[in-house]
Image (cartoon, grey):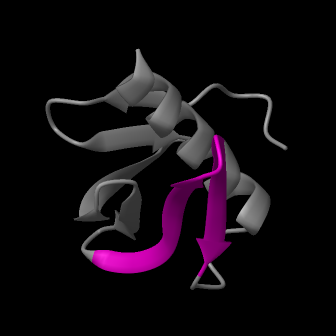
Amino acid sequence: MSSATPVVNLGEKTVVHGGRQFVMRPLAEDSYTIMEAGIPVGRAVYTFGAANAVAESDTVTEDFLYEISEAWFAAIDG
């Protein structure tokens, strides 16, 4: 896991983490495509009270996307 804390901007639907900006594009109520520079890199899904992430690119790790997903859903739950 990373030592940096992801920074969430709900209004712009972005998360900045590790010096990189990701856009959270909604697929369903608790499901998002995580995009970097317009390219899908993974998915974030909130199921059974937990954030889950799936990497779809070799440019990110599942752990890295998990941190983004955790921060995103925590911000939504406020």
Farthest top residue in view: 78
Q: Residue furthest front?
A: 48
Which quadrant of the figure has residue 36?
A: bottom left
Residue 35: x and y, percent? 35, 68
**Height in image: 42 above or below 71?**
below
**Magenta stretch: helix, strand or loop mostly:** strand
What quarter of the picture does the N terminus occupy? top right
Q: Residue at x 29, y 68 (%)?
A: 37
Region of the chain picked out in magenta, as a range: 39-55
Q: Is residue 42 above or below residue 21?
A: below
| Residue 66 seen from this side | yes
Image position of 4 (left or right of 24): right
Outermost residue on the left side: it is: 11
Residue 13, horizontal then vertical, whole percent: 23, 42
11 or 50: nearer the eye?
50
Residue appearing at x 67%, y 43% in the figure: 67
Q: Is residue 50 magenta?
A: yes
Identity of the residue drawn at 55% across and 47% down: 69
Q: Look at the image and tell me whether residue 18 can be seen.
A: no
**Does 49 lie within the magenta span?**
yes
User: In the image, what residue occupies the spot 25% across and 61% down?
Assistant: 26
Left/right placement of residue 45 relative to residue 24 reads right
Foreground pick, 72 / 38 = 72
Residue 36, compared with residue 6, is above or below; it is: below
Q: In the image, is 15 to the left or to the right of 29? A: right
